[in-house]
Amino acid sequence: MEFVSPVLDTVKCLWDCCDKRAVYIRELPENLKSLRNEMAELENVYKDVNKRVADERKHQKEIKHVVTGWIDSVEAMKREVNDILTEGEDEIKKKCLGTCCPRNCRASYEIGKMVSKKIDAVSQLCIKADNFQEVAASLPTPPVSQVAAPLPTPLVIQVAAPLPTPPAIEAGAAPPPPPAPAVIELPLENTVGLDSLSDKVWRYLQDDKVTTIGLYGMGGVGKTTLLKRINNEFFKTNIEFDRVIWVVVSKPASVEKVQELVLRECGCLDNRWKGRSEDEKARDIYNILKTMKFILLLDDIWEPLNMLKIGFPLLNDQNKSKVIFTTRFLNVCEAMGAESIKVECLKFKEAFALFQTVVGEATLNSHPRIPKLAKTVVEECKGLPLALKIAGAAMRGKTTPQDWEKNIKLLQSYPSEVPGMENDLFRVLALSYDNLSKAKWPKTKSCFLYCSMFPEDWEISCKQLIELWIGEGFLHEFHKIHDARTEAQDIIDELTLACLLESNQSKTHVKMHDVIRDMAMWLAGENGKKKNKCVIKEPGGWIEGHEIAEWKETQRLSLWDNSIEDSTEPPKFQNLETFFASGESMRSLPTRFFAHMPVIRVLDLSNSELTDLPAEISTLITLHYLNLSKTEIQSLPVELRNLTELRCLILDDMEKLATIPSQLVSRLSSLQLFSLYASLGCNGDWGFLLKELKNLKHVSEISIPVRSVLHAQMSVNSQHLRRSIRRLSLQDCTGMKTMEISSYLQNLQMWRCFDLTDVKINLEKGRVQKLSDLSEVEIVRCPKLKHLTLVAYARNLLSLTIEYCESMQEVIVEDEEIGISEVEQCSDAFSVLNTLRLSYLSNLRSICGGALSFPSLTELTVKHCPRLRKVPFDSNTNCLRKIEGEQHWWDGLEWEVQAIKHKLNQHFVPK
């Protein structure tokens, strides 16, 4: 029987090799040979590039970052490939006795898979080197004779004749006119989708009033390509310019560095300016260009440049010189006084055309299923040209649907593992991340990475995002929520200006481009080294127990519309700091799910179908933020009172919430933000909580609905509450005739206050008559209310809704008590208002006596207001996109200037 054991071992080995992974084992010898050949080819390319780099350095030229990065990648690749080749050879030698099978199939499979990936990676490095038409940042000056070559369209450019070089330049004297040609054509790749932007730039170039043009947008979007196209267009135009100067600025951008680049581009030899001071170089540049009509093209600016300090003559409509630059930052355009043009991602049709040019027709037509799979790849790139080029290069030569499906799965799950994505895309995009304000570092960077916790294409509420940042401790130095919000809004603005976030028109929501999000997730995982440091599960799916067990080292966990399998053993999240669980599929949590979360700070269960909270939530004593908004929870467990470190408790829109135990809120001694807005349980009156909130010294922001006159008055009479309540909903306050509202309010709702006749501002001593924080007002079914003059003082009002107020004749009337005329009141009222809704106001005759510009109004709704015959619009009302109302009302309106009606008529929608 001694022979049975070897035979069984052989059979088992053969069986293991017969599964789908056998191909890696079977083809390992051949793949090792291919890897050697590919590496030999890369070695030759590497030597050629290195020689070109050495030659350029002899001429004191700056080597491009993309080239030095490529060289570093090749050197790292050589070390990795040598190790893999050694391991592969050793593995081939290890065979089962008397067979051709490896002893360890698993090890052979892993090496085989690694070899296959390295073949692709080495090939991509070879392909990338083909794009190095130039390896240095500045281009060599061609002979003057090249300029005289005949062109398809006559070029009206003056070229100065070269002068003999004097032995030395006297101090303060300008160098002689340079011998360089007026414009140098640059190597240019495909410019798909840039026609309209190019046309816009040329319109600005022909406008004498425009001197500076800034092209801004996220990294990899095609700004440099557009600038090169503009440069090359000067060979085809009849616009007269004496000189087109191309300078790659990049980082770091000192005045001296830019001066030297400009002098080189102007044809000045190094010995003319080496060793000269910054002021002397500025004088040289000024004297060269002061009599010229020039175009200056500056690529890759990271901070505003002082053009006069560099030496450029003042740009005006007299000398008609122009500056065009590219940057990732809108605020750079603003600081340099430029006409800003945003370079945006391509639409799908253009994106597919670009991808097609890179991947090649032969690959796309190699199988009937591939064109459809190609569309999936293009969709994943979301129109970002650099991502499309890298993905196209990775798919070039892949002729089977299986290869495409494998790479698509990789692109969706682990994009950094797609060849080229990490080095050529993520590291390029991450330069914007690295450049974030040092004064706010690391909080700005942490805030940016946090945005990747939301699903793809998610419209992130700025309000919610800021509250999460507060809960995480990113803004811990602020004792008042209002101050923290101000700081956080500055951070959002900075991220938006850097094109790392995109803002909606009203600036209430932001979103991340999918490729930026992939880069952020890669950074959050320490450049892809720790994939489970932050786990984000996309919507829809079933999470099994073994998956949860793999997340024991996770710091941030985000589950969106997922269901979790219950397990007998509670998970142990020793490092978990943040947990999101949202969506209709989230109906329950596994037994004792919160039992082992010793360091958790943020727990967001909002928008889920949870009906109760487990008692072990009381063990989360490190919790700073708890959000249960829009859940089905009916009662808060009394154990919540143990969360004494809690700073933010958010319970908005909880329609079924009926019970909050007495003295629960008062025990939360660290509470800073308490929100119970639009939660109508307990008969909609949570006013009794005001007594508990009043005694919490750290509370600085409260949102609450009340349904009694007593509680309404309490909200104003207590100074602490008056300064803390930011959103107030007053409903069914029968008997309340006058209501004084706090000047600190942000949102005001008043529903069914049938006896209300007047709403006033509560003026604290020393506080001016303003509602500078008030942004939303909604007044419904207050039939005795005659006017709402207080909104004239709400300079930042965004939305105003008034319905079923039958006694109201004017929204804003003259305020006789204060002695301010209606014209003075309305001078800038509604200046930022974007939504105005007026419905069932049977006696309303006017909004305000006098015309208003409504410069920001985008939506107007007027229904059943038969006496409103005039709308106070003037010629500056330019943002309106939608006007809803009855057709007979619109036709019967009286207009002082008929042209305004004709202008707005296109936006009217009859209802």
Image (spheres, rainbow, N blue to C red):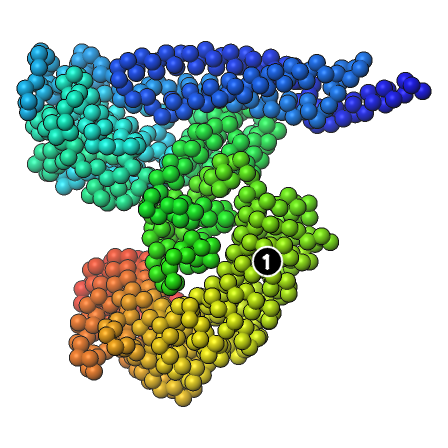
Residue at image point 23% right, 78% down: 813
| Picture coordinates of residue 830, whole percent (x, y) | 27, 66
Q: Is residue 400 left or right of residue 51?
A: right
Residue at image point 35% right, 48% down: 440
Does 740 appear above or below 271? below
| Picture coordinates of residue 321, whole percent (x, y) | 14, 33
- Which residue was labeled with disc 1? 584
Where, quadrant-wise, is the C terminus in this rendering? bottom left
Does 851 appear above or below 473? below
Along the line of sight, the residue nearer the viewer: 744 or 508: 744
Q: Is residue 419 left or right of residue 138?
A: right
| Picture coordinates of residue 400, whole percent (x, y) | 60, 25
Task: Say which quarter of the image contains residue 19.
Answer: top right
Structural crowding at the residue carrying mark 1, measured as other residues with C-alpha within 10 Å and reported as few (<14), some (14–19) or many (≥20): some
Residue at image point 18% right, 11% down: 145
Along the line of sight, the residue nearer the viewer: 870 or 424: 424
Task: Say which quarter of the image contains residue 699.
Answer: bottom left
* Type of the residue with mark 1: Glu
Q: How many marks?
A: 1
Residue at image point 39% right, 40% down: 433
In the image as oriented, which residue stretches furthest toward the right? 1
Describe the element under mark 1 as helix, strand or loop: loop
